[in-house]
Amino acid sequence: METDWPLEQLRAYRPHLLEPAGLDGFWAETLAPQRARGPHATYELVDAGLVAVETHAVELAGHDDHPVHAWLHLPPAPLRGPGPLPGVVQYQGYNGGRGLPHEHVLWALAGYAHLVVDTRGQGSGWSVGATGDPAGAGAAQPGFLTRGIEDPRGYYYRRAYADAVAALDVLRAHPLVDPDRVVVAGASQGGALATAVAALAPGSVAAALVDVPFLADVRRAVAVAQTDPYLELVRYLGAHRDRVETAFATLAHVDGAVLARRATAPALFSVALRDRTCPPSTVFAAFHAWAGPAEIEVYPFNDHEGGGPHHVRRQVAWLRSTLGARLEQ
C-alpha cells in the first residue's frame, strides 16, 4: 500500500515554502545567551558494566541554562589512538530519552566520542530520559507538538532546538574531541533536531545523518500523515478552529524543509516509502532543500523504522568516506 506519491514524483518534489519574516534574527536572538555564555557541562564517570566503552553521565546547560542530561560514551583509553576523537551527537525520536547507559554504544565502538542527548520533557515512551522542561505553555494536545504553539517564542521546539545546539557545542569543546569532526545524527524527531543544528550552527557540523525526519514540510505532513505525532496537531486544530494560521506560522520557524536551506555540511538522509508517520514527500522536501551536498537512501518496503540496522551499516561506511583520512588520525 502506498502512503504517499510514487518514487519518481517524490524525487521531483521541491515545494516552495515561505520563510517567516525575521527567521534568522529569531534564531540568532534565541541562541545569543548560550553562545555568549559558552558551552558548559559536568561529567561523572559511571560503571555501565562494559569493558569496551567508557561512559560518563553528563549534565549540560541548555536553553535558559536549563539542565539537559546525556551520556558520553568514549572508546577506552588504550583504544583511542594519539589524536583527538571524531564525535557524534545523537538526538532522540519522539518521547525517547538517552536511555540506560548500555543502550546506545555503537558509535563509541566505531571510534567516536558519542554524546547521547535527552530531549527536554521527554523520555517516558520507547526509552527513558532524565530531563524536565521547566518552561510553561498554554493549552495543548497531549504530547509535545502543540506546546506553546500560539507564539514561536514560547514554542516547545524553540527550546528543544536550542538545547540541541548546546549539546553540539559541548561535545566540540570536550578536550578529547576534534571540534572539526563532530557529526549530528538522529531519526524522526532526532532527524528534525539534527537538521536544525546543521542549519543553526552550519560552520560547526562536519556531517549530518538524518533519518526519516519529523517536522519537515509540516503543512503537507499534517495533511497526509496517518499517525501521531502529526495527528496531535490535527486534533488541536480541530478544537481550536480559529488558530490554524497562527499554529502554522509558529511551525514555520522550526520546519526542517525551511531551515535546511542553511545547512551546508554533507548529509546522508534515509526515507521509507511506506512511512505513515513522517510521509516520504516531506522527507524529500527537506532533502531537496539541503544547501550542502546530500545523499538519500530509499527503503521501498519499510514504514517509520526506515532502514534500521542495514542503514546503520551504510552510515558507518559513509562517515568513513565523508570524513576521510582524518578518522585515522
Image (cartoon, rainbow, N blue to C red):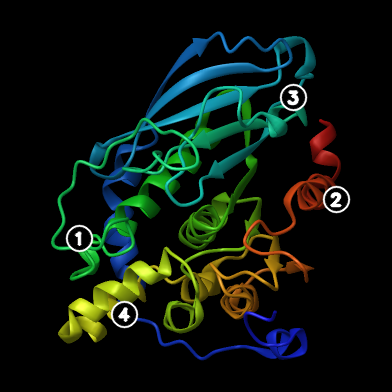
Query: Is 78 located above or below residue 89 in the figure?
Result: above
Q: From this viewpoint, is residue 246 visible?
A: no
Residue 7 position within the rendered picture, expressed as x and y whole percent measured from the top left = 75, 84
Is disc 4 in contact with disc 1, using a CB cutoff of under 8 Å? no
Disc 1 to disc 3, C-alpha distance: 42 Å
Q: Local crowd at mark 1 within 10 Å, few (<14), some, or many (≥20)? A: some
The answer to whether mark 3 and mark 2 are in CB contact below 8 A is: no
Give the labeled residue for mark 4: 248
Q: Sequence order check: which comes first, mark 1 or mark 2? A: 1
Q: Residue at x 24, y 60 (%)?
A: 147
Q: Are marks 2 and 4 in contact (CB under 8 Å)?
A: no
> To which residue does mark 2 refer?
321
Amino acid type at image mark 4? Phe
Locate residue 177: give its quadrant. top right
Badge 2 crowding class, 10 Å Cα cut-off, few under 14, some 14 to 19, many 20 or more, is: few
Q: Residue at x 58, y 18 (%)?
A: 55
